[in-house]
Amino acid sequence: MEHPAMIEGLSAQAAKLLSPQTPQQLKMMAASGLAPLPPTDMLCVLYFFAYDSDVAISDKARASLARMPEKVLLDTVGQNLPEVVLDGIAHLLTSNLAVMERIILNQKATHETIAWLAEKLNSEKLLEMIAANERRLLAFPKIIEALYLNRAARMSTVDRAIELAVRNGIVLEGISTFDEVKKAIEGQLILEPPEEDEVYPDDLEFTSALQAEVAETVDESVVTDVLEALEAGTDSLNDEEKKKVADLTASLSELNVSQKIRVATLGNSSQRAVLIRDSNKLVIMAVLKSPALSDSEIMRYSAARSLPDEAIRYICSKRDWIKHYQVKVNLVNNPKTSVSEALRFLNHLRPNDIRSLERSKDVSGVVKNAARELRRKRTE
């Protein structure tokens, strides 16, 4: 929403304070919380001045909001306040979890306000409260999307919200891996909301894997190099790096498919470097669809011969990826790339890469012959 917005239904005194003709001194007094107003009007006035273009007034109003008596603030936020005020207060006092709880429970709060809170809050309890309002989730699926993409939301909370969407035929376009998530939860046990002090082991397992410190201390290229060396049986490995990669791999290995997909979506490049080698195609596709995927990662993945055909086809279909020369080279040399796609990229290769392709033992005879013919034509 755009702030501040004029508010209707205020007392004459409050409306006068918000008038453009009100003297600066009187505005400052109101922003300081000194105007004799009932709590509802006071909160509306402070909201308005908190977004004032005058920094002195804005700062004063925000300070006044922050020091309002807790009981008065909570009682007022829980009442029939204008939608725009609730939205403004949500943005201004996000760190006050008691106030956020009242806004979440207030039916006057707009779906947009709740979706914003679902994106920004880091309280598992409050995110669970948002997810519990199924009517809101169905009316405004962007709330489900925000919950899924919020690292603080429990996995069990997210699973229930996703299952609700799937059951009601809702497509969550804001989740890049939704097709994979949808397939992953089919037949999966969806846990009921936990009791007040209950914590599901699966939630702890997911949070631990997503936030694992080791994932922040080992570079994606190192992970890839170590894993490739282990697969090749190479002994010349750095023990410290080997342990970090082993710990990272272990933290992800016990997760179920839907958990791995969410880590692939929200995690970092090191975690994706492990998950791209997963045995489940859904996890691999989730890695490729991660919004955080970098060009350097896709250059590595396009050369991976362990990827399933579906993954290679997906890479070939992405214009932003195949515009990179190295990706084209990798795909032509990758035996998993279909002949038709390899021939499509062949014409873009430089002479040195064409010659290397002719000597390759990994590509099909059709591609090698086409490379030989292309080189001959270019030299004529």
Image: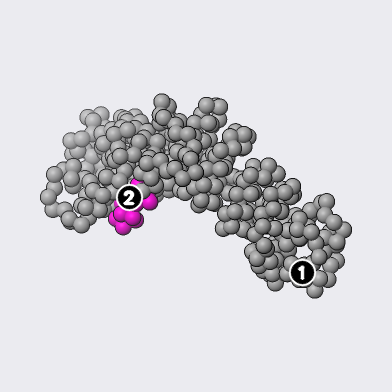
**Can you say whether 235 is above or below 48 in the image?**
above
The local crowd at label 1, few if under 14, some if 14 to 19, many if 20 or more residues have their Cα within 10 Å, is: few
Q: Which residue is label 2 attached to? A: 270
* x and y, in percent, of residue 89 in the image: 66, 55
Where is the C terminus found, in terms of image quarters? top left
Instruction: Report the mark closest to the observer, 1 or 2.
Output: 1
Q: Earlier in the sequence, mark 1 or mark 2?
A: 1
* x and y, in percent, of residue 303 in the image: 28, 42
The amino acid type found where label 2 is placed reads Ser
Residue sitting at 49 percent across and 43 percent down?
196
Residue sitting at 31 percent across and 51 percent down?
220
Visible in this render: residue 299? no
Q: Which mark is residue 368?
A: none
* x and y, in percent, of residue 241 in the image: 22, 55
Residue 45 belongs to the span the image colors magenta: no
The local crowd at label 2, few if under 14, some if 14 to 19, many if 20 or more residues have their Cα within 10 Å, is: many
**Can you say whether 317 is above or below 242 in the image?**
above
Q: Residue furthest bottom?
A: 25
At mark 2, the secondary structure is helix
The amino acid type found where label 1 is placed reads Leu
Could you give the CA–CA distance between mark 1 and mark 2, rounded to whole angstroms? Answer: 54 Å
At mark 1, the secondary structure is loop
Quarter residue 46 falls in: bottom right
Residue 217 belongs to the span the image colors magenta: yes
Q: Nearer the viewer, residue 353 or 85?
A: 85
Q: Which residue is label 1 attached to? A: 34
Left or right relative to 275: residue 17? right
What residue span does the magenta drawing correspond to?
209-220
Left or right relative to 43: residue 214? left
Residue sitting at 44 percent across and 31 percent down?
190
Visible in this render: residue 281? yes
Residue sitting at 69 percent across and 53 percent down?
75
